[in-house]
Image (tube, helix red, strand yellow):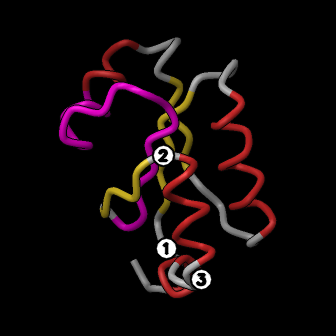
Amino acid sequence: MAHIELYTTPICPFCHRAKQLLQRKGASYDEHNVMLNPGRRAEMRTRSGGANTVPQIFIDGQHIGGCDELYALDARGGLDPLLQAAS
């Protein structure tokens, strides 16, 4: 399985939606709470090219974007191949 990282906050409904989709796909992920750890928010901004909103999603180091981008990727049939890729 791919290595998935999500930068989230516990109060973000888009974060919950993104996690639900990944869970439905059977994908495990590492979650970084940027609310509790401001250093993680700075890391998220750097890795995402300046994005400040959550969630920010990375699959095998590739920046996917936020929840809408994750769902759009799935709708195009592009999510499953990324999830199956070896890290």
- In magenta, the rendered stretch is 43-60
Look at label 2 and name its amino acid. Answer: Gly
The Cα atoms of the two marked residues, 3 and 1, are separated by 10 Å
Instruction: Please name which of the two marks, 3 or 2, marks the residue nearer to the observer.
Output: 2
- Identify the residue at horizontal 51%, vertical 44% (top origin): 6
Look at label 3 and name its amino acid. Answer: Asp
Q: Is residue 81 magenta?
A: no
Q: Earlier in the sequence, mark 3 or mark 2?
A: 2
- Identify the residue at horizontal 37%, vertical 12% (top origin): 38
The answer to whether residue 51 is above or below residue 48 is above
1 sits to left or right of 13: left
- Residue topped by disc 2: 66
**Splitting the image into 4 quarters, where does residue 44 fall?**
top left
Look at label 1 and name its amino acid. Answer: Ala
Instruction: Please name which of the two marks, 1 or 2, marks the residue nearer to the observer.
Output: 2
- Residue topped by disc 3: 80
- Residue topped by disc 1: 2
